[in-house]
Image: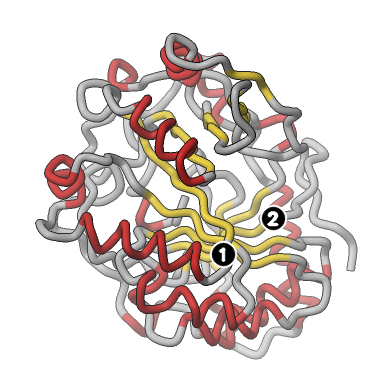
Amino acid sequence: MARLVDGYGRVARKARISVTDRCNFRCSFCMPKEPVWLPQEEILSFEEITRVVRILASMGVSRVRLTGGEPLVRKGVDELVKSISSIPRVEGVSMTTNGFYLSIFAARLASAGLRSVTVSLHSLKPERFEEVVGFKGVFNRVMSGIKAALNAGLNVKINAVIIRGCNDDELVDFAELSRRTGITVRFIEFMPFDGERLWNYDKVVTAKEIIESLLESYELYQKPREAGSTAKYFGFRDTEVGEIGVISSMSDPFCSDCDRIRIKADGKVVPCLFSRDEYDLKPLLRNGASDQQIADFIKHAFKQKFSGVETLLMRNKMPSHVRPMHTVGG
């Protein structure tokens, strides 16, 4: 099949697929305190997800990331990893997780074909972390999950959303974690996807600010950027251990070569994270449509992909809220 190309000539090479909107944490910048979950019958089955990935792979999508909510709250997700990993032309399957269940599932996921996990870890201070996620007594379990993932041979990255007045005093602590363990730590600018609708630009700590702050403690050098990458990466000049990434969605967007397509847990195609446009695949999947009909639908949806957040910023039209992050998976 023909490759997936949007109206601006951007080619889809990566898919981010939410397997559930549910999560066992309640991070305020991701979901409301009392979320309303999708009915179970609205969630795509593993068979439906595998079929969609097979169709996407036939159109040139080679890397798949499973997200949530929290993907590991869905029973049997390691079997989904195994199914997707076996699809021809899928070169890698990864997962974004809060890490709570990794100590249980890391080895199984690695055996199933998972290559890497990105763990959302927004503070290294146990009490602060537990305040952010809304539950006590979970920090050590998440850290144990990270160790289990490393022991299972998975490539591990850490994502930390940096919010002014919340955790922006921990940049060096995270950098030291990277230097000590070799784990890539990525700092993400706060985006308008919070569940409590509290986002405003004053709370955004920009990538430039983050790097300038780290330069007070370290000599850093910027690495070449991979086409389509969401992050800019920096190494430490005094050691080969560790790596820092910054994801500058709000201050320096990377829309021009964006190569991602998203599928929500209920089967809606989301061509652009910052657009509210969604295209529902589920009726086709459940009413006998052929692979070609589904492919044509996806092509049409992706063709409508919004130019990106860069356009909103230039027009001074950034919304204060797009959707809760847990509903689309980042």
Rendered residue at 27%/41% (across/down): 124
Q: Which mark is residue 14?
A: 2
Residue 49: image quadrant is bottom right
Rendered residue at 67%/81% (across/down): 51
User: In x, y percent, where is residue 64?
Assistant: 64, 63
Q: Where does label 1 land, which residue?
A: 154
265 in relation to 274, above or below: below
Q: Amino acid at mark 1?
A: Leu
Residue 73: image quadrant is bottom left
Question: Does residue 273 appear to the left or right of 14 in the view shown?
Answer: left
Rendered residue at 60%/71% (across/down): 114
- The residue carrying pointer 2 sits among few (fewer than 14), some (14 to 19) or many (20 or more) residues within 10 Å by Cα, namely many
Considering the numbered disc 2 on the image, is that residue within a helix, a strand or a loop?
Answer: strand
User: In x, y percent, where is residue 76?
Assistant: 44, 87
Question: Does residue 87 appear to the left or right of 36 in the view shown?
Answer: right
User: In x, y percent, where is residue 289?
Assistant: 69, 84
171 in relation to 9, above or below: above
Q: Residue furthest front?
A: 238
Considering the numbered disc 1 on the image, is that residue within a helix, a strand or a loop?
Answer: loop
**CA gap, disc 1 and disc 2:** 19 Å
